[in-house]
Image: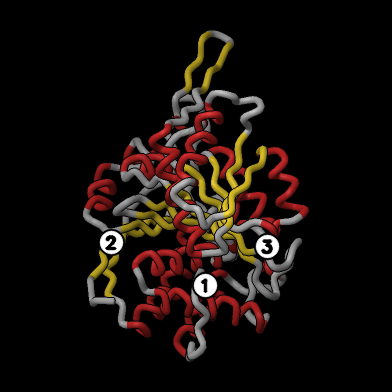
Amino acid sequence: MDNKRWNVAVLPGDGIGPDVMNAAMLVLNSTMKKFDIDIKFAFGDAGYNCIKKFGTNLPDITVNMLKKSDCILKGPMTTPEEPGSNVSAAVQIRTMFNLYANVRPIKSMKNIKNFKENVDLVIVRENTEGMYSGKEFRIDDTAIALRIITKKATERIAKYAFHLAEKRKKHLTYVHKQNILKISDGLFNETILEVSKQYPSIKIDDAHVDAMAQWLIKQPEFYDVIVTENLFGDILSDEAAMLVGGIGITPGANIGDNYAMFEPIHGSAPKYTGQDKADPIAMVLSTKMMLEWMGYENAAISIQNAVEKVLEEKKVLTYDLGGKSKCSELGNEIASKIETTVDSNMQKLK
């Protein structure tokens, strides 16, 4: 890997966002120092906290900053829910930079209470259309939302998912509801099967989304790469996260052809704002995904190993993990493991 200087835009977000971001930055700074990685950070404002000041949750000054960066490290943000209010900042960014692949790894870790052991799967969610297209309107007492599925977007997400499956266990499951959504999911499935011809080494199967919800509970260890549309992927990934300890430890990435955004899959938990008690592991592991995307595989593995080492020791854990430590204390503990641990036997990342 060359000594490229990376420009990373950091958006701490709302609620617990600044707390978990501060903890993640402690870990990231230790990792950069250990592996001689050159990243320049620019911090910006986005989220619910900006609306009163700027009239929007994604100010122009922040957008200009994002356009000068190589990728984004984003904390959780609160999205207003009132009709006519701002579209979520995350959705705006995904659309703006065409970040079509939402990637959410679901993996069991030792010493975290799991519903199922030996879970190691990735949910790949189409990120730009479906029910989250934002195309909705109301006529008197009738509200209508458009679920948009295109061949172009489906081809793109299918190729991403098949390519990922090639690097993993060569098994892909596509999730749909064609028995009810005959036209839109008919196109989705037809396109997945067309793309599958380019990947003859990949075993493929499919499931209706409601059946998939139960199979994830019954036999999640069966699955490897799961690809689906926007709404289904959002719901299934939260469900799957609970199998391995919850959304507090689950990272996510939004990937485009030349740009990416990394964020935990959990929300901003406003009631814990400024209390320094949230679990930062999902945010920390999101930085791991960022380094992996940049090509720093050993650095990414080091973060994973440090997190697992802290969990194994059980000395510094936040309340959701059965401990009494602060968010910042857990961040410091993981960072210290980065500095002191020699990763001589690094397992290869999947």
Q: Residues within 10 Å of mark 2 (few under 14, many from 20)?
A: some
Q: Earlier in the sequence, mark 2 or mark 3?
A: 2
Q: Secondary structure under badge 1?
A: helix
Q: Position of residue 313 (x, y in %)?
A: 66, 84
Q: Position of residue 53 (x, y in %)?
A: 34, 41
Is 340 rendered above or below residue 293? below
Q: Residues within 10 Å of mark 1 (few under 14, many from 20)?
A: many
Q: Which residue is mark 3?
A: 244
Q: At label 3, which amino acid type do we have?
A: Val
Foreground residue among 213 and 199 = 199
- The residues bearing labels 2 and 3 have C-alpha atoms spaced at a distance of 33 Å
Residue displayed at 27% across by 75% down: 38
Q: Is residue 258 visible?
A: yes
Residue displayed at 52% across by 22% down: 145
Is 331 rendered above or below residue 259? below
Q: Which residue is mark 1?
A: 328
Residue displayed at 60% across by 25% down: 181
- The residues bearing labels 1 and 3 have C-alpha atoms spaced at a distance of 23 Å
Q: Is residue 302 left or right of residue 33?
A: right
- Determine which of the numbered discs, if any, sits on residue 42 in the image: 2
Q: Are marks 1 and 3 in contact (CB under 8 Å)?
A: no
Q: Position of residue 134 (x, y in %)?
A: 45, 29
Q: Residues within 10 Å of mark 3 (few under 14, many from 20)?
A: many
Q: Position of residue 21 (x, y in %)?
A: 45, 63
Q: Secondary structure under badge 3?
A: loop
Q: At label 2, which amino acid type do we have?
A: Ala
Residue displayed at 29% across by 65% down: 41
Q: Earlier in the sequence, mark 1 or mark 3?
A: 3
Q: Earlier in the sequence, mark 2 or mark 1?
A: 2
